[in-house]
Amino acid sequence: MTIQKIRLNRAIVIDMAAAIADEEGIDAVTLSRIAVDAGVKQPALYRHVSGIEELWMLLSLRARDLLVVSLSAAIDQRSREDAVLSIAHAWRTFVQQHPGLYSATDRVPSVGNQEVEQSLARVISVLTSALDDYKISASQKAHCARSLRSALHGFCVLEKDHGHPELFDINNSLIQLVELFCRGIETLEL
């Protein structure tokens, strides 16, 4: 049986890596694995990515870009707690649908690379807009958006990695997290 060579470009390499990550986990993403799947020798990949670190960075950018699309759609025509709860469900759904791709966001530092910093700023921007109807200062809103990101990231990573072994319904846990968060924001309102 002959393996069909795939005509590669940067986007296809990222697509292949994302598919492997979601199907088998981020640790299964290697340049040698992608080369085998593409029917090429590994050095052929270096025309498209400089190495595994760059590929992880590109995957993290893709993950955040797709997350921003999901979060933006989730807050459409919603406000206050309804917007925050919708964001939380959208974040969780994204991680459930793209567990390996989402894991790439933890593979690269959040600072030191302009593209990564900008992708993270877009996530924070959507979270900030979900808080627009709360009567808090711009500074408080920025801190709250950062806190919301931390809470949702932590909750979803724990769920993805089976870190919620308790018998309690996890959906209710997410709802309660949002309720606690929103009650906290309300104490800051002017």
Image (cartoon, helix red, strand yellow):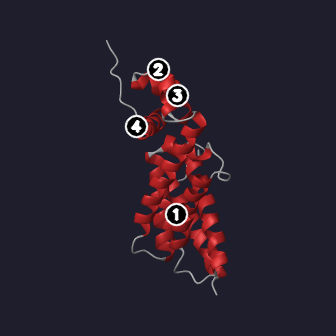
Count of numbered circles in the view: 4
Q: In the rendered structure, are the residues bearing label 3 and label 2 in contact, judged by CB atoms less than 8 Å apart?
A: no
Is residue 172 visible in the rendered image? The answer is yes
Q: Nearer the viewer, mark 1 or mark 4?
A: 4
Q: Give the alpha-carbon distance from disc 3 to disc 2, as whole Å.
A: 10 Å
The secondary element bearing badge 4 is classed as helix
The amino acid marked with disc number 3 is Leu
Q: Nearer the viewer, mark 3 or mark 1?
A: 3
The secondary element bearing badge 2 is classed as loop
First-in-chain label (3 vs 1) = 3
Instruction: Identify which residue is drawn at 61% across, 46% down.
Output: 106
2 or 150, which lies in front?
Answer: 2
Q: Give the alpha-carbon distance from disc 2 to disc 4, as whole Å.
A: 15 Å
Q: Decide: few, some or many residues near mark 4? Use Cα within 10 Å; few <14, some 14-19, many ≥20.
A: some
Q: In the rendered structure, are the residues bearing label 3 and label 4 in contact, judged by CB atoms less than 8 Å apart?
A: no
Q: In the rendered structure, are the residues bearing label 2 and label 4 in contact, judged by CB atoms less than 8 Å apart?
A: no
- Report which quarter residue 173 is drawn in: bottom right
The amino acid marked with disc number 1 is Ile
Query: Residue beneath label 1, please?
Result: 175
83 or 31, which lies in front?
Answer: 31
Considering only vertical position in the picture, is 172 above or below 40? below
Instruction: Identify which residue is drawn at 52% across, 44% down.
Output: 58
The amino acid marked with disc number 4 is Ile
For residue 12, the mark is 4
Q: Position of residue 144 (x, y in %)?
A: 63, 70
Query: Residue beneath label 3, please?
Result: 31
Query: Residue beneath label 2, please?
Result: 41
Instruction: Identify which residue is drawn at 49% across, 29% down.
Output: 45
43 sits left or right of 8 in the view: right
Considering only vertical position in the picture, is 74 above or below 46? below
